[in-house]
Amino acid sequence: MAVFLVGMANATSNPQEGQLDAFDFAAFPKINKLNLSTNSLVGAIPKKLWSSRSLQEIDLQDNHLNGTISPEIGNMTALKQLDLSFNQLEGELPATISSLQYLTYLDLDSNKFNRCKQKVDYDRYGCLTKYNALSRYHNNLLRSQVKTLRKEYPYAKITFADYYTPRPHLPAQAGHFRGLIPTGIGNLTNLQILDFSYNHFTGPIPQSIENLRLLIELRLFNNLNCTIPLDIGNMTSLQQLDFRNNQLEGGIPVTISLLRNLLYLALGTNKFSGTIPIDLGNRQTLLLIGLANNSLHGEIPQSLCKSFQLQELILNNNNLSGTLPSCIQNCSKLQLLRLGQNHFSGNISPVLAVHSNLTVLDVSENQFSGTLPPTFCSFTSLLILDLSNNNLSGELPSCWWNLQNLQFLDLSTNAFIGKLPTARNHLSSLKSLNLAYNYFHGDFPFVIQKCKNLIILNLGGNGYCSIIPSWLGVTNPRLKILQLRSNMFYGNMPRELSQLAYLQPLDLANNNLTGSIPTEFANLTSMRQQKTEPFVILVENISGYPYFGRVDINWKGHDEIFQRTVSLVTGMDLSSNFLTGEIPTGLSNLQGLSS
């Protein structure tokens, strides 16, 4: 009969506190399982715990334990599962772990372990051939987020890679393992999950990795510089292959199409060249194809549409060309389509025929042509729509604002005409609206009054001809960037714009404005304060490929594109108008004034 001691996992109502050293493990010589996870235990793990010869499973995750793992852990000859994740353990991992011949599960996520001073010899670690999970992280994550996830999903195994996203200002949260991935990794023949992400491995992917025939998930998010081994096609159990953010080069191996169980293929941000393998789409299980930020060329193969389960197709920032295959309309489950920054051409209709599950559609910086049909209004799930820098034309459909979930809308640098349609309801989701450099005309769009949460507004380079309404400074209090340059706005500048407390760049240049500069403009406090920390206007991090809202600003006579650093740009451009009078006192304190 198995004997076990359990301190309830997720025991938020009655958490166990204190130190493990106070517990007399010797009094329970037949304990098989010890579970004291998600409590408030502190202090070091006592050596006497590691003296138990009967324990098979130990779960101490999500506590406040510190100190090191004692070499005595090698005495636990019956141990099968060990979870010490989400603590504050430190030091080096003892080599005696290699004595645990029955160990099948090891989770050390989110601690403070040092990288090994001596080279890890995987060939000596015979026990590792039976590991089902191998986690080697060095991080301090937000414990509250982890606990919340575990409360909501008590039966789910939540690992570090499921919710961690690297941020430029948190470099200490990256792993500390460096050097080459040892060739002995191929000896771990029963391994199912291998995740070396967010460390500092360099060099090639060892050929021996193809021996891991039972591997389900392979994530090598590092600085590897090599090609992908052709034998990767032998790893037929793979469901997730993530080689993002490396320096991998050469062509994408055609043998990847042999991975019959593959669900997620993420090869973005590398140096891949050549064409997309013709047979890649034959894997009808694929849910995600991510090849962004490479140097791929040629057309999208027709076979890519064969995966009717495909949910995310991410090909932006390559050198792809040609027209889109009409079969893309068959991808009825597609939620995210990113084709921006390529050389695609032809009519945009095949793109717009994609079904209405889309949340992100980015075809910016191509040569697409055509108009937007009324059926486009059925894309009510859209959060991000970027059609900028194409050859699109015609009027926007009158039903346009059925897209009430839109957060980011960029139609700039096309040939759209007419007026912006009116809206019945408030557009509270919209944060960024860029209509610059089209042929829109008429009065200042009244629909802007319903965009209460608007942060970016760019109407520059159109044919608007009216006064600038005073309500703009009242109904849109969150505006940070306001660009109305190169239109035909006339009349006085409304003093109510001074109420926009967050306004940084204000660009009213090249209009027909008259009168004097309102003295209240000196109260635009956000322009007076020196900015040192950039903010991102809009980021949707989807599938590991973040979408940054781009802002085009005419800065000191030159058109510049800003993304992450746009908050560092402050100033006011009122040039090329018909203004009179003196510059108000205090206006000189604003950054980057152009008059």
Image: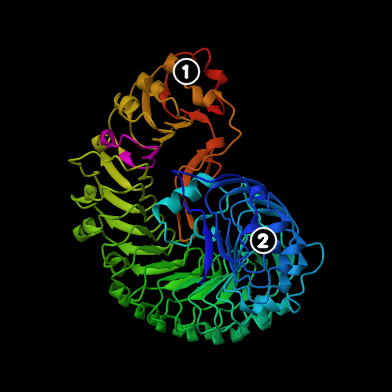
- Whole-percent x, y for residue 572 in the image: 49, 28
Q: Is residue 386 above or below residue 514?
A: below
- The answer to the question of whether label 1 and label 2 lie on touching residues, with beta carbons closer than 8 A, is no
**Residue at the extreme front of the image, as rendered:** 27
Residue 556 visible (yes or no):
no
**In the structure shown, which secondary structural element does the residue marked by tag 2 occupy?**
loop
In which quadrant of the rendered view does residue 509 lie?
Answer: top left
| Residue 458 is covered by the magenta coloring | yes
Residue 189 visible (yes or no):
yes
Q: How far apart are marks 1 and 2 (CA)?
A: 47 Å
Q: What amino acid is at disc 2? A: Asn
In which quadrant of the rendered view does residue 212 lie?
Answer: bottom right
Of 286 and 194, nearer the camera is: 194
Q: Is residue 30 above or below residue 392?
A: below
**On the rendered structure, is 120 left or right of 414?**
right
| Residue 590 is covered by the magenta coloring | no
Of 539 and 351, nearer the camera is: 539
Q: What amino acid is at disc 1? A: Asn
Give the residues drawn in magenta, as a range: 448-463
Q: Which residue is drawn at 24% across and 35% down?
A: 446
**In the structure shown, which secondary structural element does the residue marked by tag 1 occupy?**
helix
Task: Say which residue label 1 marks.
Answer: 523
- Whole-percent x, y for residue 424 in the image: 17, 41
Q: Which residue is drawn at 66% across and 75% down?
A: 128
- Residue density around tag 2, few if under 14, some if 14–19, many if 20 or more, within 10 Å: many
Sequence-wise, the earlier of marks 1 and 2 is 2
Q: In this view, does 542 lie above or below 267?
A: above
Say which mark, if any, is on residue 199: 2
Q: Residue at x 57, y 36 (%)?
A: 568
